Image: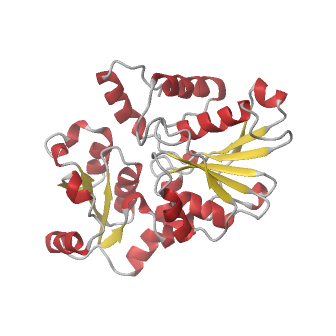
């Protein structure tokens, strides 16, 4: 399945003679949008081929991965189990749009402390989870593993070879690794981390087969899920001017960063850039709930 490339037109892009397109991976599926569709594709095939009836994964309260896994699991006849970061959510998960959606699609929850969550890949926790839920297909946080990379290698198509740069937001590093592997040598892949720090380089190096990439560390807005009024206004203005919705965790920061780099002259005249819209729009409702509590502007939906 291939997503369309939509051109972004702003006067300053024309003045600087920069071509910018966005690949609308968010349109792939109404519930399993963007990179989650790609990451889950081969994992679901493998889970069923291996005879599993349970699929267990990890995530936070607004996780796109949790929502997508719940829906996809139900569609494929798999019982999904979500190990959720934060014991305090156990009594109020129904107030969270992401978790409520996951529950509606059959996901069972296991809430654990943030301290325990940091040890999520250790054998002791895995053993305890198997004791509680029985055998399960294990899908890491964010869905990133070798099969997810295989799926993400299908994001780029033959028609994308003319682009000089391919840019994507980075969470766990899986999506960008697949894009790097599918890119051609003359292209540079730019990753915009949603998290503070450059520790993701190590994770990307586990899967990336080429070296034509770099991380842009200046546009995380303070860290994962951190936003401010300036970013919210940008997301709302971008939708008003282009018709394209952006999420505040990933694609909003990606597009803000890319356009800021163009304004600062980071790209030479004639450059063609392709940005990847990785979806994640389901998280806007939950983010708006938090913004209301802080008396900040809301993201238009």
The residue shown at (67%, 65%) is 211
Count of picture labels: 0
Q: In the rendered view, does 272 fall on the left or right side of 292? A: right
Res 16 visible = yes
Q: Residue 20: percent from the left, percent from the top?
A: 74, 40
Q: Residue 159: percent from the left, percent from the top?
A: 78, 56
Query: What residue occupies the far bottom of the structure in this picture?
Result: 50
Closer-to-camera residue (156/87): 87
Q: Residue 162: percent from the left, percent from the top?
A: 82, 54
Closer-to-camera residue (151/270): 270
Quadrant where the image shows the N terminus: bottom right
The colouring scheme, among rainbow, by chain, secondary structure or one colour, is secondary structure
Q: Residue 40: percent from the left, percent from the top?
A: 46, 63
Is 239 above or below relative to 72?
above
Res 109 visible = no
The residue shown at (34%, 18%) is 295
The residue shown at (71%, 62%) is 183
The residue shown at (66%, 45%) is 275
Is 294 above or below relative to 100?
above
């Amino acid at each position: 399945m291939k997503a369309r490339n939509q051109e972004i037109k702003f006067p300053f892009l024309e003045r600087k003679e920069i071509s910018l397109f966005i690949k609308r991976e968010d349109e792939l599926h109404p519930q399993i949008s963007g990179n989650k569709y790609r990451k889950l594709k081969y994992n679901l095939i493998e889970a069923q081929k291996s005879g599993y009836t349970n699929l267990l994964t990890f995530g936070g309260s607004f996780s796109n991965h949790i929502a997508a896994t719940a829906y996809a699991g139900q569609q494929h006849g798999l019982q999904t189990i979500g190990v959720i970061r934060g014991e305090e959510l156990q009594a109020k998960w129904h107030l969270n749009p992401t978790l409520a959606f996951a529950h509606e699609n059959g996901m069972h929850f296991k809430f654990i402390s943030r301290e325990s969550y940091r040890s999520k890949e250790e054998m002791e926790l895995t053993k305890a989870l198997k004791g509680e839920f029985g055998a399960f297909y294990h899908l890491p946080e964010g869905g990133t593993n070798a099969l997810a990379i295989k799926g993400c290698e299908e994001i780029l198509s033959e028609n994308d070879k003319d682009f000089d740069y391919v840019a994507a937001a980075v969470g766990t590093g899986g999506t960008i690794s697949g894009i790097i592997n599918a890119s051609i040598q003359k292209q540079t892949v730019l990753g915009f981390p949603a998290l503070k720090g450059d520790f993701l380089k190590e994770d990307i190096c586990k899967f990336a087969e080429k070296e034509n990439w770099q991380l842009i560390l200046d546009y995380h807005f303070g860290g994962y899920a951190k936003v401010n009024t300036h970013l919210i206004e940008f997301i709302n203005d971008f939708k008003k001017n282009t018709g394209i919705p952006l999420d505040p965790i990933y694609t909003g920061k990606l597009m803000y960063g890319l356009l800021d780099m163009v304004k600062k002259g980071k790209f030479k005249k004639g450059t063609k850039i392709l940005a990847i819209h990785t979806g994640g729009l389901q998280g806007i409702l939950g983010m708006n709930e938090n913004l209301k509590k802080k008396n900040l502007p809301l993201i238009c939906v």
